[in-house]
Amino acid sequence: MDVFEAIKERRSYRSFLPEEISEKTIEKILEAAIWAPSPLNTQPWEFIVVTKKDVKGKIFSEAERCIKWSLEKSGWKWLENYQANFLQSAPVIIAVIGDPKKTGVDMFLEEGGVGYQHACAAAIQNMHLAAHALGLGSLWFTFFDKKAMREILGIDPNKTPLAIVCLGKPSGEPIQTRRKDMKEKTTYIR
């Protein structure tokens, strides 16, 4: 699969078939993740693979709590209809954990300390592209409280749960999203 084709064709899925994903396939996706770039090659990521139903249920409950809290705080009406059921139906959930101590030299800059997050985001993108190339659907999910996720997954308090990647065979068609023209989002300084 051509990389440009994969980038343009990949979509987020919120509906998955109940079919299991093999450990070999999960490992291929994680192998793609670890080849992402990182500051000073610190590789600040760790992954927790969740297939256990009761743990997925706890993650779902945390997401539901955050949705309700966010609706109350923001007043954003679209949150009334937001459903996170895919957290229970996705055969695999991979939590991406970042280590702030591995952020690179930006830790010394005034507004620094985010390099590890950017590296983890690159790893997540690699996971999505690998899943797509393997015929799987995926979703990048961040609607959770970090403290609660540390407790649910037993994460070291000095590390940061940054995202959850849901994986599975897609059920139905993904939501089609429009992209703004590249020229509208680009400035050249010459």
Image: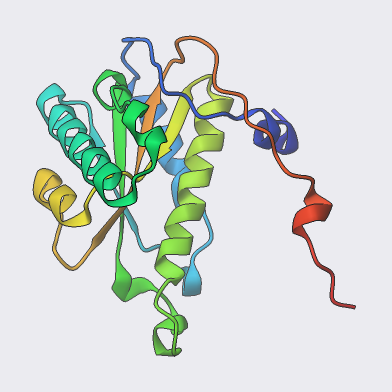
Placement of 65 over or under 45, stated as above or below: above
- Measured as percent of width and height from the top left, residue 33 is found at 46, 46
Placement of 31 over or under 169, stated as above or below: below
Left or right of 179: which side holds 65? left
Residue nearest the observer in this picture, 82 or 141 = 82
**Residue at x-position 47% and y-position 54%:** 121
Placement of 181 over or under 155, stated as above or below: above
- Measured as percent of width and height from the top left, residue 145 is found at 22, 51
**Which image quarter holds the N terminus?**
top right
**Residue at x-position 37% and y-position 10%:** 17
Report the residue that reaches farthest toward the right: 190
**Residue 105 picture quarter:** bottom left
**Residue at x-position 60% and y-position 30%:** 10
**Residue at x-position 74% and y-position 38%:** 4
Residue 62 visible (yes or no): yes
Placement of 51 over or under 153, stated as above or below: above
